[in-house]
């Protein structure tokens, strides 16, 4: 049993996915490259055929050079114990035979698409001097997305050199056998083209062109009968498309396509409007074929008879010509007419003898019986049924099954209903139940990576429980079921405990915090406070936090560092002197002005001189209007007081007091400390007429 076995320590066999006359195909896992592959293992029948094994390896190695999107890639060829195997690309899909059975007849457009891919693949093989020799839908795979890939290069060539003959294999391939192969000749590039034509016929019609009760009868039809018109079963086929089939399957290789590239070009252009109704392909009449040549009489010969040599009659007999022997001439004509028929009959018998020598040993012999159906029976019960039908129990192959219970027969090989000889061994495929999978230890790995891996193993129910943990986010902490447990993927619930990473907390706003407040925050938050430095601040008091990193609201885990910058207070700047010119308007009171004019002559000169000459009151402000003219003296005097608040003055007492009789301008001087401002106030006759703030200059 190969299920679960690791071939060459690398390819772990998972399940049986197919089989044929020469090999079984298994789905396996490449443990090194972590990918699914198909492993074709030769049947044990070939273990004692060293010539076949050697040729098989040589041809398979040669096929590894074929790298083409429509050829199944061969990754490895090897031998282990009694196993001879090929590791190939795993194509998810079905065989072209299954596709035809489900969809046939296939539409013209889809047929041309499939045939175009096949022609490209075979052309690539021919360019590399490799002939397939066994092209048939069973050896062609079509993926779910419509990509066609051909496989089994080299196996047919190896099989042709062995003495083993399998009836099933012969019957499977004879439907696509070229005439030259049927008569025992060597396969050529044009043999592959013939097989492609038969495959195309089957795609278009859903049936094979030739059928019969035995391989011999089918082979003879390939030799003698022209390929029937596909339009007989599918009248909608364009003539240009039918012509491809007829030309590819011409009996004489001479009339087939010269190359697969030429056939591919016809396939690509078959549906062009100018080709749809082209004339039907007809093989031209051969002017060189053997024909019956009529006997030429002497009369018909005419004058040419005089050119014959005449022998004199020594006996003096009558010189008159002898009459021809009419009876003998008639026998000669009859003999000549029969000759071509005799030659044709002999040729046919030679071909028939060759086929008989090849096939009759496998067809003549014990009585033919049908393989009974034993699916669902136990191995012992199935063996008893086989014995009752005159058959032997062959290899018991254990494999998984999604539907058949453990211990019961899934199928037989040959399959139920097939005609085989009495005494033939029939292999039994015994179910081991649903395929199991051994869980690995996934702790410490990333959850997403593990999900991708297990989804490929057909696990459908994978749960995730997230918790805070010191491990990085997404890391698997624990799993259920435990490692090394064997489970059925489709019916198992996997639960992984996954780290959300360490738990985080939002950083508070520390702006304006004192050192005492920072110490308290460090203890309650779990963060580590680090002093990044000091800087001047016009807004934050000395020894308080100016800024922080990271910013408030940032999520951090406990123990993370928060850096703060501490204020050194305002930067010291020297006081600055600011000079400001102010205008003090004179606005006399109307009543007081009239009274003053009437009593002007009575005013003493000493009083006027006292008011106008008060130089001290105006000198502090650099008086520009201290002098008065005659008209000004007529106006009543108004008292002005100037108050200044700066580094040197206070608003508690005026810095200047003086009288005006007209509008004057004053220069005020302020001494201002950094970060502060000065103010001034002007009063006239006890009323505030101006008040303003003077900032520290930048």
Image (cartoon, rainbow, N blue to C red):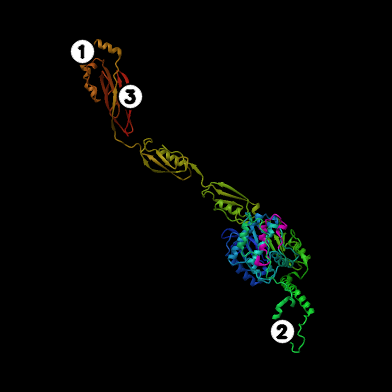
Marks 1/3: CA–CA distance? 35 Å
| In the image, residue 328 above or below residue 368 | below
Report x, y in % for residue 497.
57, 49
Report x, y in % for residue 254.
65, 67
Instruction: Name the residue beneath numbered marker 1.
Output: 604
- Within the image, what quadrant is residue 175 found in? bottom right
Q: Is residue 251 magenta?
A: yes
Instruction: Name the residue beneath numbered marker 2.
Output: 310
> Mark 2 or mark 1: which is in front?
2
Instruction: Name the residue beneath numbered marker 3.
Output: 691
Marks 2/1: CA–CA distance? 198 Å
> Farthest residue in the right direction?
327
Give the magenta range: 227-255
| In the image, residue 691 above or below residue 325 | above
The mark that comes first in sequence, 1 or 3, is 1
Q: Which quadrant holds the C terminus?
A: top left
Is residue 137 in sight in this rendering?
A: no
Q: Left or right? Give the position of 59 relative to 590.
A: right
Q: Mark 3: which secondary structure?
A: strand
Report x, y in % for residue 313.
74, 87
């Amino acid at each position: 049993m190969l299920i679960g076995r690791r071939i060459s320590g690398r390819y772990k066999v998972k399940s049986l996915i197919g089989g044929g006359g020469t090999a079984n195909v298994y789905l396996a896992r490449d443990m090194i490259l972590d990918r699914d592959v198909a492993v074709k293992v030769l049947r044990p029948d070939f273990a004692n055929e060293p010539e076949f094994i050697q040729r098989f390896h040589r041809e398979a190695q040669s096929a590894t050079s074929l790298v083409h999107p429509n050829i199944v890639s061969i990754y490895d060829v090897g031998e282990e114990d009694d196993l001879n195997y090929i590791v190939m690309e795993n194509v998810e899909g079905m065989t072209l035979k299954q596709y035809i059975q489900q969809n046939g007849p296939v539409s013209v457009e889809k047929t041309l698409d499939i045939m175009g891919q096949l022609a490209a693949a075979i052309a690539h093989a021919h360019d590399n001097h490799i002939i397939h020799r066994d092209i048939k839908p069973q050896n062609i795979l079509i993926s779910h997305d419509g990509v066609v890939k051909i496989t089994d290069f080299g196996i047919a060539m190896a099989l042709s050199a062995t003495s083993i003959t399998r009836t099933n294999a012969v019957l499977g391939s004879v439907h696509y056998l070229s005439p030259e192969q049927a008569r025992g000749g060597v396969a050529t590039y044009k043999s592959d083209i013939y097989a492609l034509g038969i495959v195309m016929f089957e795609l278009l019609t859903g049936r094979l062109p030739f059928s019969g009760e035995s391989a011999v009868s089918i082979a003879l039809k390939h030799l003698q009968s022209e390929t029937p018109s596909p339009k007989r079963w599918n009248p909608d086929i364009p003539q240009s498309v039918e012509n491809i089939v007829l030309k590819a399957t011409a009996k004489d290789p001479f009339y087939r396509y010269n190359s697969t590239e030429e056939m591919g070009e016809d396939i690509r252009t078959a549906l062009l409007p100018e080709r749809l109704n082209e004339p039907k392909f007809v093989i031209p009449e051969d002017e060189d074929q053997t024909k019956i040549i009529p006997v030429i009489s002497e009369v018909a010969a005419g004058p040419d008879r005089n050119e014959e040599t005449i022998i004199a009659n020594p006996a003096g007999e009558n010189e008159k010509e002898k009459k021809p022997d009419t009876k003998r001439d008639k026998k000669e004509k009859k003999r000549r007419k029969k000759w071509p028929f005799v030659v044709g009959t002999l040729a046919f018998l030679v071909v028939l003898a060759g086929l008989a020598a090849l096939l009759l040993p496998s067809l003549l012999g014990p009585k033919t019986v049908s393989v009974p159906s034993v699916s669902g029976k136990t191995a012992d019960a199935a063996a008893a049924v086989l014995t009752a039908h005159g058959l032997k129990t062959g290899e018991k192959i254990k494999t998984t099954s999604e539907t058949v219970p453990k211990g019961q027969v899934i199928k037989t090989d040959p399959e139920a209903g097939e005609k085989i000889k009495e005494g033939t061994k029939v292999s039994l495929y015994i179910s081991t139940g649903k395929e199991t999978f051994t869980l690995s230890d996934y702790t410490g790995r990333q959850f997403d990576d593990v999900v991708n891996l297990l989804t490929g193993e057909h696990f459908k129910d994978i749960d995730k429980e997230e918790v805070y943990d010191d491990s990085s986010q997404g890391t698997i902490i624990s799993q259920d079921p435990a490692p090394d447990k064997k489970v059925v993927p489709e019916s198992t619930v996997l639960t992984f405990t996954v780290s959300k990473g360490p738990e985080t907390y939002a950083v508070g706003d520390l702006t304006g915090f004192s050192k005492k407040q920072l110490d308290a925050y460090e203890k309650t938050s779990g963060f580590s406070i680090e002093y990044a430095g000091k800087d001047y601040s016009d807004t934050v008091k000395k020894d308080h936090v100016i800024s922080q990193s990271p910013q408030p609201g940032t999520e951090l885990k406990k123990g993370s560092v928060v850096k703060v910058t501490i204020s050194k207070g305002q930067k010291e700047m020297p006081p600055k002197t600011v000079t400001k010119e102010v205008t003090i308007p004179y606005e006399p009171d109307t009543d007081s002005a009239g009274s003053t004019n009437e009593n002007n002559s009575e005013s003493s000169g000493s009083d006027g001189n006292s008011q106008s000459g008060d130089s001290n009151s105006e000198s502090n402000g650099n008086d520009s209007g201290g002098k008065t003219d005659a008209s000004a003296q007529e106006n009543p005097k108004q008292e002005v007081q100037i108050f200044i608040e700066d580094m040197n003055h206070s608003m508690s007492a005026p810095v200047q007091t003086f009288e005006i009789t007209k509008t004057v301008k004053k220069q005020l001087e302020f001494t201002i400390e950094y970060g502060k401002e000065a103010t001034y106030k002007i009063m006239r006759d006890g009323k505030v007429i101006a008040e303003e703030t003077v900032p520290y200059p930048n």
